[in-house]
Image (spheres, helix red, strand yellow):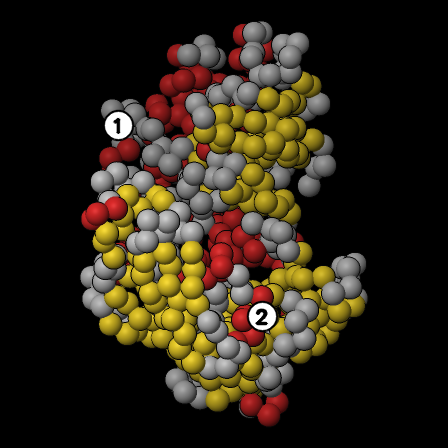
Amino acid sequence: MSSTSLLEMKHVKKTFGSLEVLKDISIEVNEGEVVAIIGPSGSGKSTFLRCATLLENMDEGTLSYCGESATLNESGAAQYVDKKKLHSIRNDFGLVFQNFNLFPHFSVLKNVIDAPINVQKRDKAEVTAEARELLKKVGLENKEDSYPGQLSGGQQQRVAIARALVNEPKVLLLDEPLGALDLKLRKEMQKELKKIQQEVGITFIFVTHDQEEALTMSDKIVVMKDGVIQQIGNPAQIYNEPANRYVANFIGESNIIEGVMKDDRLVVMNGKPYECVDYGFEKNENVDVVLRPEDIDIVAPEDGKIVGTVKNVLFKGVHYETLVETRTGTSITIKMTVYNDEPVLNSGADEAISANDFYLDISDIPELTDMDIVARANAAAWKISTEESISINKIDYKIEEKNGTYPVTFTTSSGTSITVNMIVEKENKVVDSKYGEVIYAVNIFKSVDDIVESIALDTDLKTWANAQAWTDDEEEIIEVTDVIYDFDPKNIEPGEYSVTFKTRGNEYKVDTTDQHFEGDRVGLTFTPNDLHIMRKGGL
């Protein structure tokens, strides 16, 4: 493969209105390469192609072709004023789109030769000879008199490719070229396209959202998300050494486990140390560990590095996709009392005041302030006529450092008051010594309106209950990932409900040829080479 640079883009940006579609894109494509631009819809893939082929002016950045700059104005922006040069550059590109854009009233041969003869004014005999040679290469030498409507989707695509190649472009660009084909035909055409590229020997750049397609066909993969290149590398690099969580999840199946690099070639995950082959991280640096499903072996529990329970099994034809739960996560359940908010009204003073009962840990009492009490009781006062907030200027209570119920009274300057209860309890926490985790939360009182009007209830419940988790040595905060409740937040009635907060459990997806069954106790094992370490901070 040639290492001669064909296309180079540096710091390219493109916006449409207020939408920034490409954000500081830089890439180099060499002659003879097959480059896949992969990403979800809206990631900027097609805009990337259009800017690369000068069909779209970029806002910032530079482009060069075979070492020659294509940005011709003084500011460096791609406002192309040399029409002759622009035409010459565009002739270096052949384009194949998903819908093929064949003329239905033209034969296969005429679809291929029409533009070179009638637009470019090339010699008819020469073009026809080239077209027939190309149709032979794409396996359509017996279809030159057929019409597009008489061809299969794969055959139509090959016509589109021949038409794009007849001008002998330096690079062929394909925008979702296989997206309209069924699975079987798509796989066949992947092989055909690769064969055509090898026979013709030109550069291919193709856009796709299909990870398998990118891995199968390309020499280089460019992974995009939201107009940003996440990683560039060959298929093996992209698959085995993903740059971040996004790449790991987008390219292939991944088990991603939070870990800590204790030293070179030593990572701690799930509270246990494991040998790996990665190095160069800071000691005690938080990392993500990627473990591919096909790299895990299921063994007897006593032989496993990790032990778990089979939760689900799917037969995939050549293997079983087996889900193994190795831990459920540390959880805590609180009591949530829901009530109808009934403020105290003082019509004579045109005032209303409201508050709710609340729970309090004994350990919080020494540092308890009036502001804390107001916040925990959600105490508020307002003018009835205008709903304008007014101050609560007096708080009366007596409290002891022991369990019990203690009244607290909130009063305005006009004497409007409400009394609620502070319920003192021991600290509500669960310690999971097996995994070195502590999770904490408090029981709560909330009004029906609080629940119904919540925009992000899971987040609000965590805030209201002060739900949090940490390592038992208090060195690290642990995310509370799950909030579980059994009520309909839009139709909740007054009453008592349970809410459970939970840290992340661990599940491993395993591809195996051996069949296992739900409920089986199994071990999981892997080698140091199977663990791929990623730095945090990726998307």
Q: CA distance from mark 2 to mark 1?
A: 84 Å
On residue 211, which mark appears?
A: none
Q: Secondary structure at mark 2?
A: helix
Q: Nearer the viewer, residue 504 or 336?
A: 336
Q: Which residue is at 20% across, 66% downward? A: 493
Label 2 with label 1: CB-CB less than 8 Å: no
Q: Which residue is at 36% across, 33% downward? A: 100
Q: Secondary structure at mark 1?
A: loop
Q: Residues within 10 Å of mark 1 (few under 14, many from 20)?
A: few
What x and y, as percent, mark residue 224?
A: 53, 42
What x and y, as percent, mark residue 11?
A: 64, 28
Q: Which residue is at 38% across, 59% downward? A: 410
Q: Nearer the viewer, residue 44 or 475?
A: 475
Instruction: Tell me the residue that label 1 is attached to.
Output: 104
Q: Residue furthest bottom?
A: 302
Judge depth for marks 2 and 1 and give the one in front. Answer: 2
Q: Amino acid at mark 1?
A: Pro
Evaluate whether residue 204 shows in this view. yes
State whether residue 180 is above or below residue 70.
below
Q: Earlier in the sequence, mark 2 or mark 1?
A: 1
Instruction: Tell me the residue that label 2 is attached to.
Output: 366
Evaluate whether residue 194 shows in this view. no
What x and y, as percent, mark residue 209?
A: 45, 46
What x and y, as percent, mark residue 14?
A: 52, 26
Q: Amino acid at mark 2?
A: Pro
User: Which image quadrant: the N terminus?
Assistant: top right
